Amino acid sequence: MKPSELRIVLSDIAIEDSDQEKPGVILDRDEDRNIIELEILDASKRIHNPRSLEDSIFT
């Protein structure tokens, strides 16, 4: 199975900065440092039950 990327877009405002919060978790921010996009690399390997939306990625 090919690893997957999960991308959650909260706003279409231009990305000013990107931070890797922890390995494989990238937060894109606007000029006011608000999170506007979240990327989880290899998401299928990080989530214990991929059919469930309840999982914590920042633990």
Image (cartoon, rainbow, N blue to C red):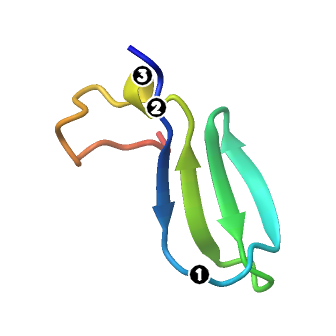
Instruction: Tell me which residue sits at (28%, 25%) in the image.
Output: 48
Question: Mark 2: few, some, or many residues within 10 Å (few <14, many ≥20)?
Answer: few
Q: Which mark is residue 45?
A: 3
Question: Mark 1: few, some, or many residues within 10 Å (few <14, many ≥20)?
Answer: few
First in sequence: mark 2 or mark 3?
2
Residue that extends furthest to the front in the rendered view of this protein: 2
Q: CA distance from mark 3 to mark 1?
A: 28 Å
Q: Nearer the viewer, residue 42 or 1?
A: 1
Question: Mark 3: few, some, or many residues within 10 Å (few <14, many ≥20)?
Answer: few
Instruction: Look at the numbered disc 1 and give the secondary structure of its residue.
Output: loop
Nearer the observer: mark 2 or 3; the answer is 2
Amino acid type indicated by mark 2: Ser
Amino acid type indicated by mark 1: Asp
Vertical side of 5 occupied by 11: above or below:
below
Per the image, the residue denoted by label 1 is 12
| Horizontal relation, residue 53 to residue 35: left or right | left
Quadrant location, the N terminus = top left
Amino acid type indicated by mark 3: Lys
Vertical side of 36 occupied by 56: above or below:
above
Q: Nearer the viewer, residue 23 or 14?
A: 14
Vertical side of 27 occupied by 30: above or below:
below
First in sequence: mark 2 or mark 1?
2
Q: Which mark is residue 4?
A: 2
| Horizontal relation, residue 16 to residue 55: left or right | right
Asked whether the beta carbons under mark 3 and mark 1 sit within 8 Å of each other, the answer is no
